Amino acid sequence: MNPSTAFATVVVDELIRNGVREAVVAPGSRSAPLALAFAAADREGRLRLHVRIDERTAGFLAIGLIRGTGLPVPVLTTSGTAVANLHPAVLEASHSGLPLIVLSADRPPALRGSGANQTTDQLKVFGSAVRLFHEMGTPVREVGQVAYWRSQIARAIANAVGARSADPGPVQLNCPLSEPLVPTDGPDWPESLAGRSTGPWTAVHAASGPPTAISPGPKTVVVAGDGASQAARLVAEAGQWPLFAEPSSRARTGPAVISAYRLLLQANALAGEIERVLVFGHPTLSRPVSKLLARHDLEVVVVSPTGLWPDPARRAASVVTGLEVTGPDTTDWLERWQQADQLARPAIDKVVTDSLTGPGVAAIVGEAVGADGMLVVASSNPVRDLDLAPVVPIRTIANRGLAGIDGTISTAVGAALANAGPTYALIGDLAFLHDSNGLIIGPDEARPDLRIVVVNDNGGGIFSTLEQGDPTHATHFERIFGTPHNTDLGALCAATSTPYTLAETPEALRAALTRTVAGLDVVEARIPRTAHRPITEALIAALSQQ
Ligand SMILES: Cc1ncc(C[n+]2csc(CCOP(=O)(O)OP(=O)(O)O)c2C)c(N)n1
Ligand SMILES: C=C(O[C@H]1C=C[C@H](C(=O)CCC(=O)O)[C@@H](C(=O)O)[C@@H]1O)C(=O)O
Ligand SMILES: [Mg+2]
């Protein structure tokens, strides 16, 4: 089966699984895969197909079918002006709140701007009239496409009917399709085209609905990503399930918290026993969690109060607003994770505390901030080091929306100005340099009580822990990833009259942090950038032997 035919087969099947029973098609060639799939579904009695020559008619016919059935209705056109002919109907659907699903076939991006026939810029062609625009990737023969296609249809339908937004309206899925555009003989598709049982790939519950009941049974873990509320902790405790909470999640308290989750997911056999994951907030921090959420052998339930829900692996079986736990897991599942966590802690501390290391600095900062303090933590290693530190229920802020290293000092200054008590920041040297202008505060401006702890490894330490940090890439690594700068941070602080302290041992760092936070000051902790990779490897090795 060729990619365009596989795509069309799956898309039409998933539309039907999501309640579509009428479809409108205007003739074209680039849209052929989808038109043929709709025709096949019509012949099988799975939906009723309507064909109209003029896309303007097709669009308003779909409007009428929506008004008559109350169901979302897809309308398919080929590329070019055909798509633009739907604009009047899209505008009507937008102002009437009607779930019109525009499937605009398109040439692949490589043909755009090349003078290729019937090829224009169809991206967001309806502007703000649609509740969702998404350009489907050009279908390719690879595993994972089916989950993507099905998951995206579920997102499109949910946005069109307003399931999470209570704001129904039209959506546009732009569908680049490459030739061959009609079914051809050829290799079988590399994965099953089938959906999940008989229902939608992702069941998106209405945001206005009651909490969804969830029962014990499957070996469940709770993931609390950035911004997760205390609901994650409450669900984990009610279910007696292990809780993996990122530093900027408010759920980072309570007996269910597994502080070494990131290492245990990589080094402990318990990870392989997980059967269900409940996701709160926006998990971004670690690949072990990303890999967990991408596993095919477990159920992913995403809890999101808004219209956006994280599902980068496209595996979410359901999206709910809230969970009501019907009863606790009475097995030793949580106890086994707690025991593994307790065993891991000494092994971690042994590796990270005999000298100044990233995780060691983070642990010392966590102690200094204390349970009623506030901490702003920068992306890259600092937030990951804090994630590994012993859990202290600190109010933690991190710009994890896009994980940029920019603006962190200014964010910390703002947070500190809004915080009644002392505020700390934990930041890497590049992030510090990136926003060193944040230290410049005019004489008439309000000044924060903020202590900025800079973990200075003279460059981008995180890259040494990634693929590019492998010795085989040493030739260019230092210049394009390590990016050493040799900046005198003390002089930089002096230029802005910012008090500065250098701490080169754990004891010196503790001493520097115990001083009262009054005004803005900087403490620099210097660590060797070359230690990151060996430390990461030593941690995994230590836990793997347990
Ligand atoms: C604005 C922005 N530019 C570039 C990046 C890519 N990036 C991610 S981590 C990193 C290096 C950060 O170095 P540092 O702040 O010193 O932290 P370290 O990894 O050394 O602990 C870079 C450049 C980014 N995330 N955001
Ligand atoms: C440097 C960038 O971001 C990368 C930084 C760290 C992420 C990561 O995987 C760290 C190792 C881990 O937590 O297991 C990496 C990722 O998410 O895969 C990010 O891409 C960047 O410039 O994007
Ligand atoms: Mg650094």
Image (cartoon, rainbow, N blue to C red):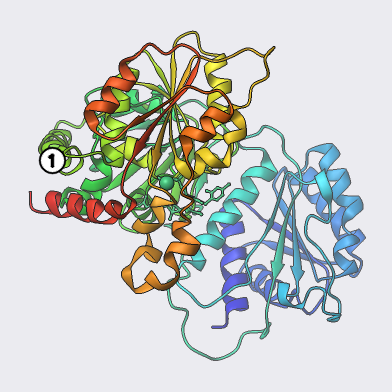
User: Measured along the vertical axis of the image, is residue 307 above or below residue 466?
Assistant: above
Q: Position of residue 182 (x, y in %)?
A: 67, 84
Residue 441: image x %, image y %?
Answer: 64, 21
Number of residues whose C-alpha sits closer than 10 Å to that of mark 1, classed few (under 14), some (14–19) or many (20 or more): few
- For label 1, being within 8 Å of ligand 2 is answered no
Please give the residue where the numbered disc 1 appears in the rendered image.
350
- The image quarter containing residue 117 is bottom right
Q: Foreground: 255 or 513?
A: 513
Residue 326 visible in image: no
- Residue shown at the point (53%, 55%) measured from the top left: 151
Please name the residue shown 64% across and 73% down the image.
40
Q: Is residue 432 above or below residue 544?
A: above
Q: Nearest the camera: 69 or 320?
A: 320
Count how many numbered circles sit on residues in the image.
Answer: 1
492 relative to 238 in the view: left or right:
right
315 sits to left or right of 170: left
Q: Amino acid at mark 1?
A: Lys
Q: Secondary structure at mark 1?
A: helix
336 vs 130, left or right, is left
The answer to whether 460 is drawn above or below residue 98 in the figure is: below
Residue at 16% from the left image edge and 44% from the top image edge: 351
Question: Is residue 184 something one can see in this rendering?
Answer: yes
Q: Nearer the viewer, residue 238 or 266?
A: 266
Q: In front: 31, or 23?
A: 31
Give the quadrant of the N terminus: bottom right
Q: Residue at x 57, y 59 (%)?
A: 14
Query: Quick one: which residue is furthest to the left in this view?
Result: 546
Outermost residue on the top side: it is: 420
Residue 545 in percent (x, y) is at 8, 53
